[in-house]
């Protein structure tokens, strides 16, 4: 081991946890602002097509970085088992979880969907017990109870008063237009969808950690290399799955928005959310572990609630604040 490598190992042994937490928090900030930007985008954008579009942009982002971090040689060293685990991870997270979450957000508002789906670290813990060796504690049981109470509070709250879209469309709110209401059944379905999206993200995060463990990176640079490679693989798989599904369900007309002047804005949003956000999250999982990365990424719902109230005038009731606080406290107790 040369002096540079030895120094790198010492650095990653001294600071991996704090760096992982920082990276996970950065990803949380990116994704909380992304959700609001998507919901309040000025153009009418179909959520399913945007989900497919952003993973393509994100994959290209990682392929641009890949030659600077090992390139094809690094890819050849990855085992078929690792590639399979990472592929399943991204299908559950990006393809299933994100698509369902975006639909839920258009029905019950960002200030409702974000806190509800933000409980996914609870599911991550439940999966980590058999797969990653996490321990069950009394605090974890108490935290689970608090999360269930939070879900009850947020699930019974009425829809946000910002304009809502139907048929998986994202529209910008208009001050002089009365928002269209949704039925009680649709609201409960949207709450259930946000919970299911949380479970899908938990499965994705747990499998991502398993895939990273298979590679066993040692230094901070190794982790950065691996994160770029993992991002390229996962988003490529996501694009292969989402593009034909979107075409089949929505038809060719759904891509019209990507041939307008809105394209540069949508590309930038894809790079920001799916490229940069994924890079920081994978680094967080690699350095802090799946459970802690999920915990600190759960700051996204709280940030989303605050941002939606400040910038987009979504009504934040006492019930919403209480439910958000209980969800975050519950998640913390589960994972400490």
Image (cartoon, rainbow, N blue to C red):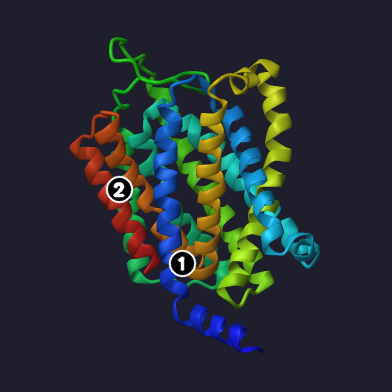
Q: CA distance from mark 1 to mark 2?
A: 30 Å
Q: Is residue 4 left or right of residue 138?
A: right
Residue 20 badge? 1
SS assignment at label 1: helix
Percent across and percent down for residue 283 are 53, 62
Percent across and percent down for residue 123 are 48, 55
Which numbered disc, 1 or 2, marks the residue that appears first in the sequence? 1
Q: Residue at image x 62%, y 39%? A: 57
Q: Is residue 271 left or right of residue 23?
A: right
- Is 234 located above or below residue 175 in the figure? below
Residue holding disc 2: 149
SS assignment at label 2: helix
Q: Residue at image x 36%, y 69%? A: 336
Q: Quadrant location of the N terminus?
A: bottom right
Q: Residue at image x 44%, y 59%? A: 24
Instruction: Looking at the picture, tell me which residue is in the foreground, 185 or 162.
Output: 162
Percent across and percent down for residue 184 are 37, 23
Residue 254 badge? none
- Is 127 located above or below residue 325 in the figure? below
- Is 29 located above or below residue 270 in the figure? below
Percent across and percent down for residue 110 are 37, 34
Q: Does any portion of residue 22 appear in the rendered image?
A: yes
Foreground: disc 1 or disc 2:
1
Q: Residue furthest left?
A: 318
Using a 10 Å C-alpha cutoff, classify the residue at mark 1 as few (fewer than 14 neighbours), some (14 to 19) or many (20 or more).
Answer: many
Using a 10 Å C-alpha cutoff, classify the residue at mark 2 as few (fewer than 14 neighbours), some (14 to 19) or many (20 or more).
Answer: some
Q: Does any portion of residue 119 appear in the rendered image?
A: no
- Is 11 located above or below residue 30 in the figure? below
């Amino acid at each position: 081991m040369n002096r540079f490598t030895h120094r790198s190992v010492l650095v990653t042994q001294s600071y991996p946890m704090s760096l992982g937490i920082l990276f996970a928090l950065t990803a949380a900030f990116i994704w909380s602002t992304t959700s609001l930007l998507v919901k309040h985008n000025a153009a009418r954008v179909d959520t399913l097509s945007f989900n497919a579009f952003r993973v393509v942009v994100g994959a290209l982002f990682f392929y641009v970085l890949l030659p600077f971090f090992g390139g094809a040689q690094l890819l050849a060293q990855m085992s078929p088992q690792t590639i399979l685990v990472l592929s399943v991870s991204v299908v559950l997270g990006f393809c299933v979880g994100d698509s369902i979450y975006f639909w839920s957000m258009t029905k019950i508002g960002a200030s409702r969907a974000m806190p509800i789906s933000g409980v996914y670290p609870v599911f991550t813990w439940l999966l980590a017990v058999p797969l990653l060796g996490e321990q069950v504690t009394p605090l974890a049981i108490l935290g689970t109870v608090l999360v269930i109470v939070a879900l009850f509070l947020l699930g019974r709250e009425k829809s946000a008063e910002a304009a809502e879209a139907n048929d998986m469309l994202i529209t910008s709110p208009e001050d002089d237009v009365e928002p269209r209401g949704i039925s009680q059944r649709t609201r409960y379905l949207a709450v259930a969808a946000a919970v299911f999206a949380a479970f899908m993200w938990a499965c994705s995060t747990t499998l991502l950690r398993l895939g990273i463990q298979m590679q066993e990176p040692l230094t901070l640079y190794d982790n950065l290399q691996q994160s770029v490679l993992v991002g390229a693989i996962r988003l490529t798989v996501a694009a292969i799955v989402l593009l034909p599904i979107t075409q089949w369900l929505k038809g060719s007309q759904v891509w019209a928005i990507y041939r307008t002047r809105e394209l540069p804005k949508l590309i930038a949003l894809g790079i920001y959310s799916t490229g940069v956000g994924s890079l920081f999250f994978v680094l967080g999982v690699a350095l802090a572990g799946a459970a802690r990365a999920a915990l600190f990424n759960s700051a996204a719902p709280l940030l989303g609630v605050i941002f939606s109230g400040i910038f987009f005038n979504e009504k934040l009731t006492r019930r919403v604040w209480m439910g958000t606080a209980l969800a975050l406290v519950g998640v913390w107790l589960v994972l400490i």
